[in-house]
Image (cartoon, grey):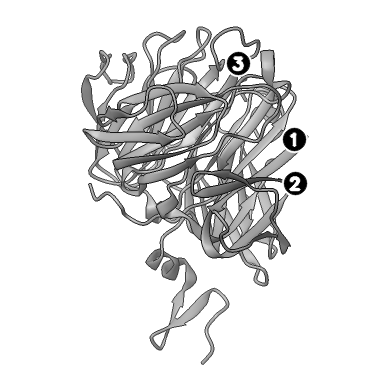
Amino acid sequence: MPCDPTEECSFGSCVPLCILIQDAPSSVGCSFFATKHDNYYSNVNAPAQNDSLIAGNISSDTPVNAQLYFIPPNSNVEQAQGGPVVIQPQGAYTWSLSQAEIDSVTTTRQGGVYRLETDLPIVAYQHSPIGATATNDASMLLPEYALTGNYVVPSYRATIGNYPSYMMAIGTQDNSSVNITVGGATAGGGGIPALAAFASTMVVLDRYEVLNLVVAQQNGGDLSGTIIASNQPVHVIGATECANIPQSPATYCDHLEEAAIPLEYWGEEYVGAHAPTRGNEQYHWRVYGGEDGVMINTVPAQPGFPLNLNKGQYHQFATSQSFVITGNGPFMPVQYLESENPNAGTGDPAMYQMVPTEQFLNRYTFVTGTGYDVHYAQITRPVNGAEVTIDGNPVGGYYQVGNYEVADVVVGEGTHFASSNQPFGVSQVGYTGVTSYAYPGGLKLEVINPQ
């Protein structure tokens, strides 16, 4: 008997593809969590400021059935948001997330969460908001099966009062004990005590319960380097409501966000390829330590290297170069895009995690944002590596970075497919006037660092 289109034969049995993909885990999946991020502009009575969830069908020949669920505040029961949606092969679909944000306070909230479920594997992204309107950033979401309990949170210091650095965690199982060691002093609220920098507390989260943790000093405070250790998987977001990069003399602040990659998947080698050039900007970085005593170096040499980082520590620097960065333990480089003024000319701050070379894939499906002037797929491969194609077109125009080479490829708005006979990396970046978005294009999620 032939298998259903949502299944594949494995050892004589028909197994759902949503289960089979977990044998080779990656950023592709069938269940994803999201909740509205706190941004400069509130979405209350302003639907244009809603966050959006984008799903991309990775199949070239089979439609995907997708259902978005909403768990209302003070509830743990999923409610279907409209009927199922059919996403055509190589297509994408966008849902508007209208739940109000948790605005600049430390608290917990049961519900106010979305979960997307599909019958075939997809890729998923969250944009805050979707269009090219200030202030904006976006995240690649990780599938539920790949979430863990172990994170170091990226963020950035806030620029102006009432638009702080913060983090969020969504529980995926009841009675999850989430231990938190904060990277900066935090405000108390919702039964959570105020904490001094590097102090710890524990919060119990149920499935669909949200923790929102905010810095005590909303202008200049920074939660970067906060360590999460939970006994059950949680979905973690690091963010800043509005930040200037650098703090001066930049004109416009912008929202920053990333769905944090768990520590288990951090690597020991990355290509620190600077974002596609806009003008005469610098490229800003923070490198976060994933365990104590990690020795890290760069080629070519960058400010402050070589250095040692402990878990949760970070080193910040700015450069005009791309580089290869290696360590003897897990670490994570995060790139922060510079504000439009005075030197970039377009775009605005965004932050995105790099992908370890150990987690490169041979094939990616990725989806751009909407309404931007230009979208890039940044391709990284070994020098003279196997040909990479995007939508069947060979990639060219590489420049060398150590033993790797990088190409910034302009792509149209929508869904794209990149492939090669050899593992390579993809990052996505989009620019328009006074706003940008950036996120990894995908990655393998092999456990490199058991916790």
Residue linked to disc 2: 413
Q: Residue at x 28, y 34 (%)?
A: 295
Q: Quadrant of residue 88?
A: bottom right
| Between 108 and 144, the one nearer to me in the picture | 144
The CA distance from mark 2 to mark 1 is 8 Å
Circle 2 residues within 10 Å: few <14, some 14–19, many ≥20: some
Q: Disc 2 or 3, which lies upstream in sequence? A: 3
Q: At which x and y percent is residue 2?
A: 54, 89
Residue linked to disc 1: 372
Residue linked to disc 3: 253
| Between 397 and 159, the one nearer to me in the picture | 397
Q: Disc 3 or 1, which lies upstream in sequence? A: 3
Q: Is residue 227 visible?
A: yes
In the rendered structure, are the residues bearing label 2 and label 1 in contact, judged by CB atoms less than 8 Å apart? yes
Q: Amino acid at mark 2?
A: Glu
Q: Residue at x 68, y 65 (%)?
A: 89
